[in-house]
Image (cartoon, coloured by chain):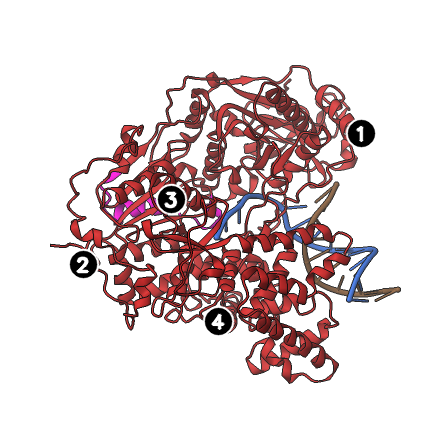
Chain colours: A red, B blue, C brown
Amino acid sequence: MSALPPSPPLPDSGHPAFADIGFDEPDRRDETHDPHEPPARPALPAGLLANLNPEQYAAVTLAAEPALILAGAGSGKTRVLTTRIAWLLQTGQIGPGGLMAVTFTNKAAKEMVHRLSTMLPYNVRGMWIGTFHGLCNRFLRAHWKMAGLPQSFQILDSGDTLSAVKRVIKAMKLDEERFVPKQVSWFIASSKDDGKRPKDLPTDDGQARTMVEIYQAYEDQCQREGVVDFAELMLRSYELMRDHPEIREHYQRRFRHILVDEFQDTNRLQYLWLKMFAGTPGALAGREPAAVFAVGDDDQSIYAFRGAQVGNMSDFEREYRVRQVIKLERNYRSFGNILDSANALIAHNSRRLGKNLRTEAGPGEPVRIFESTSDFAEAQWLLEELQQLHRGGMARSETAILYRSNAQSRVIESALFNAGMPYRVYGGLRFFERAEIKHALAYLRLTENPNDDTSFLRVVNFPARGIGARSVELLQDAARASGRSLYQSVGALGGAAGTKLAGFTALVDRLRDATRGLTLREIIERMLDASGLINFYRTEKEGQDRIENLEELVNAAEAFVTIEGFGKDAVALPVDETAPGTIAAPLPGEPEAVAAVDLLPDAETGEILSPLAAFLTHAALEAGDNQAQAGQDAVQLMTVHSAKGLEFDAVFITGLEEGLFPHENSLNSISAGGNEGLEEERRLMYVAITRARQRLYISFSQTRMLHGQTRYNVKSRFFDELPEAALKWITPKQQGFGSGYAQQYQQAWQRGSGPGGMVGAGRNSGWQPAPAAPPSWAAPVPAAMRQSAAKDNGHGLRQGQGVFHTKFGEGVVLTLEGVGADARAQVNFGRHGTKWLALAIAKLTPIE
DNA sequence: AGCACGCTATTTTTT
DNA sequence: ATAGCGTGCT
């Protein structure tokens, strides 16, 4: 008997193309097994399971039932995930069409596919392995009609989303001061991430009601224009599953194994989405839910600020009655002192699922702690230490400097730049986010869908063709009045403006007609020429880089490939040979750099998305690398957040100061369960520490330039939570302004020309500023007061002086006022806040 | 249409 | 300090 009946046909389907494409081929191999009775363990493919430790082995070979894997940092998480997939396939428990593996980032998905392809003798690219959003896209392309979308719907990135929101606010004639586009955009995205439509939201007060109205109007606008934002991809897929039992049943029967990476980072909607695909225990008539294999680490949950719910882990455990919780605690990355530090630190968090990393590698080097007088001195020290490591034979790319906030990179970059030390900063503009690329994509999108108003507005007058803001406004009014797109409304305008606009739409039409039947490369080349983009940048002084990027876009199109079929039958096709029915030979050697996507066929007709539409989808879902200075062996600079998932021989964690790390803003979010904000900061520090293989350095500075002013800082409380035995304090005894590092740095700074050509670090998309509250942790020191810095007021104190108070502990003097019995001092006690003290009463002992 | 000035905000980020 | 953005001027 087969416990797993073949998937039912989709409603109104039965079109042969559906199965031919392999998109939804039911897995016949399943029918020889009963997945609910664990199959006898077959002979293991040679080498596949070799060298797994007992816990890894247990996880990889778990029976087909819901499981939670608590995978500590460096415990071989990706290996377990990929080996399990390979094992499931090779033991014949499931076919390549019967499982789904979900990650958060394209990078992780690619890594998984890459590793799998080395484990399995066939092409794995056609499988349902990808990011949440990538899989949603695939799903919606198959069921676009039922989802109420046009077949070639476009995807908005966060920039597009913001401008779309701006247009809505303008159209509603609302005050942008009261309804800040960024905040509104964030509100809409978070509502969607919570699974909520406008009708599900409270409208208690006027402000809230208007916000919901904007949300509704934004939805209508997106629907009219045929575009979806990132959150919409998830929400629309979820609702489609929820509201269509036949679709739901189809996919629930199909995917018997669902593997989820970084489960601790899932938000509410993503968990709901997973439950839809897996089925909820007890709610399925006589069926078992899919075997969800959730891999995560609650100690590495650092994205609560963008909606991640660590609670999904315990919810999953409870709701799916997980019997198998496996902890991977053996660390293969770091030496003992590093792990001891990580363990001791994270032990200060409450409500952990509980995990302790261990290694057999021995203690290794101590964790080195450096106290510096200024951020300049800290940067200079970093440079010298890096030079020493490099002289000792360590590759620069194996060394990383981590910081809590992007603003910290500047001073470090200056020091490295002036010394000629190659470095690479993560976090700049991504390829597909560059202005010239967005312009080019806008033209391409208009040929696919002229009603895409976002794209229309972006390029209607770029390059300049005499269509001013006034004309555009008239056009928008006409469009609004008739409820049609800008493109459709051009005819309604007369006069000179109407003529020029008609010229633009004619250009779009010409482009669409002229590129029909051309290859992707030819389409893009034609567009670059006809739009005038290339010419525009040729005449620009700074246009050379932009032209190179546009050429790179042509290359990306050239390398664009789709995958057809599953497993052994899968072939990679250059996208221009994918006319339905044609089969091309696999690309020679299947280069790793290839940008592979799916054919994205319609579930009913099997009709494949045009190469151009598929490419545009790809561009939207994968913003591309941000390697500004790739190639060279360079020191890696990044925030702690972006370091997650990476590892280096030597790691420098900088700026360990109260208010900065842990960050002041995080300390506000105290909930019933404790100080959630602080605990997330601690997890962040835990992530930072566990990036290091051999050497770990942690530094902090007494003073730091922030927002143009010097701030006096107290060292981070996290130092108190590290095991003294694992540490080595390497700060030179004698320090201070005008001596040592600070002075050396000053000279280097004056000599150098400053950091030219470095990558801009500022980049904010969902984050919203909290109401401005003056930071209490490191009050800026007014210039007038600074004069008193060197002056002694009779109490042996000066500004910047370290002091000790019996109740508040260590602090730094920020300001001094009055003399004699009246003398007062403002002291920053870090976590205990900033206080004014009467020096006649308070017992302050100078330290250092 | 393009530039200059002034204002504002400055934790973390992927898709 | 400084970058990005909106407004207003040439």
Residues marked 1 and 2, same chain: yes
Same chain check for tags 2 and 3: yes
Q: Amino acid at mark 2?
A: Pro
- What chain does mark 2 sit on? A
Disc with the residue nearer the chain's start (1 vs 4): 4
> Which residue bears the numbered disc 2?
A5
Nearer the observer, disc 2 or disc 3?
2
Q: CA distance from mark 4 to mark 3?
A: 32 Å
Mark with earlier residue (1, 3): 3
Magenta stretch, residue numbers: A303-325
Q: Secondary structure at mark 4?
A: helix
Residue identifier under label 4: A223
User: Mark 1 — on which chain does it sit?
Assistant: A
Give the mark, 4 or 3, whose residue is nearer the N terminus: 4
Image position, residue C7 (x, y; %): 75, 64
* Residue on which disc 3 sits: A261
Determine whether the residue tagged by mark 3 lies in a helix, strand or loop.
Answer: loop
**Residue under circle 1?**
A751
Seen from the viewer's position, the closer of residues A506 and A723 is A506
Q: CA distance from mark 2 to mark 3?
A: 28 Å
Mark 1 or mark 2: whose residue is earlier in sequence = 2
